[in-house]
Image: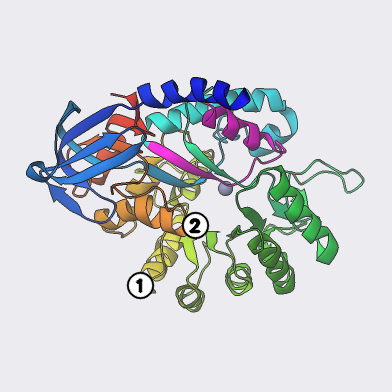
Amino acid sequence: MHKLYLLLIWFPVSLFAQSTYLLKPDRVFDGETVHEDWVVRIKGDKIDAAGSVSSVSANGAEIIDLKGTTLMPGLIEGHSHLLLHPYNETPWDDQVLKEARSLRVARATVHAQKTLMAGFTTVRDLGTEGADYDDVGLKQAIDQGIIPGPRMIIVTRALIASGSYGPKGFSADIDVPQGAEEADGQDALIKAVRRQIGKGADAIKIYADYRWGLMAEARPTYTIDEIKLIVDVAASSGRAVVAHASTAEGMRRAILGGCKTVEHGDAGTPEVFALMKQHGTALCPTLAAGDAVSQYRGWKKGTDPEPERIKQKRITFKQALEAGVTICAGGDVGVFSHGDNARELVMMVNYGMKPIDVLRSATSINADTFQLKDRGRIKPGLLADLVAVEGDPGKTIANLQRVRAVLKGGIFYKR
Ligand SMILES: [Zn+2]
């Protein structure tokens, strides 16, 4: 009885949801290279075929004219916080301490929609920043079609060494709720990693360094042994570990400990970047976050000279490129506005990357680095997550900010 019931319900749904489209843009970026005069055929939620006009059948397909555009795999945001909003609206401390989680989640649903409409069909969301496990429900709401949004890779609360994170600056006599989960040492770390996975974490995030105590400077937090333990425990469930690290020593420990990506990497050195290359650790540079924070602190971009922090970031980012480090695309969006994700990609070109390499980072390279085998390229059998942007972003990267169409799972969200 039950089986028959399910069949009756599910069979028609899957049958009638199968739309077939033939998309005709000016050109296709397939995640690796650009092809002029290609078309892409979509069937249901998958890519059915891609190639020259003469090689792909139009039979039975609705033809979608995308003249004047480049069709690409849906962009992958490598570093977002859907539960945060720009710090010039509300400082991070106040978001964590004064905003109700219901308010934060309500806002996050809008962030999710803006992200998708900007052509980002997947986000790696790197921490709820004090909103506990609220990314789990947000991801479920998107996956169940309750709200529009990108596919999410989530890390839930993230892990911090005791005493190292924020909000900080309060009396030493009181304990202030923190923006991530404190855990240290053998047993507590094993438990915390396993608990976060159990609650829904797709990856584990650690803070390998942070501005600590009364000193304003960032210092390494976890020992190499602690990081190795976290990586080991996460790996047994097939999950990767990502490390926030801005100091050279924090980065070195994250690399040697086996973390898959290093976030920020501001004070990396040629030696550290060589080590990243050697271990296959990817760098997610978050250029747009540092740029935004400098402006929130008073820098008038375009008028004032670049602050020391920005000059240094340009230097270390170049060193990473010269060392041949795999570069992820991720802006730390949330620090700046959701939906403005492409700002990072424009800045990557401004800081020295070729536009075509930036397009690869935001699609196939992010997919490979985050172990997403079903997306990031335009190839038969992969998910029909696609974005069409005006003109040729391989020549003018800012065209990524001119989105004309967005498909996720073969469904048009923008057309
Ligand atoms: Zn972040």
Relative to 134, 269 lies left or right: left
Q: Secondary structure at mark 1?
A: helix
Q: Residue at x 28, y 29 (%)?
A: 405
Q: Residue at x 67, y 33 (%)?
A: 95
Q: Amino acid at mark 1?
A: Glu
**Range of the magenta residues?**
120-144
Q: Which residue is mark 1?
A: 322
Residue 338 sits above or below residue 239 on the image: above
Across and down, in percent, residue 371 comes to 48, 56
Residue 404 sits above or below residue 396 on the image: above
Residue 261 sits above or below residue 319 on the image: above
Residue 309 circle label: 2
First-in-chain label (1 vs 2): 2
Q: Amino acid at mark 2?
A: Arg
Residue 33 circle label: none
The answer to whether residue 9 shows anywhere in this view is yes
335 part of magenta stretch: no
133 part of magenta stretch: yes
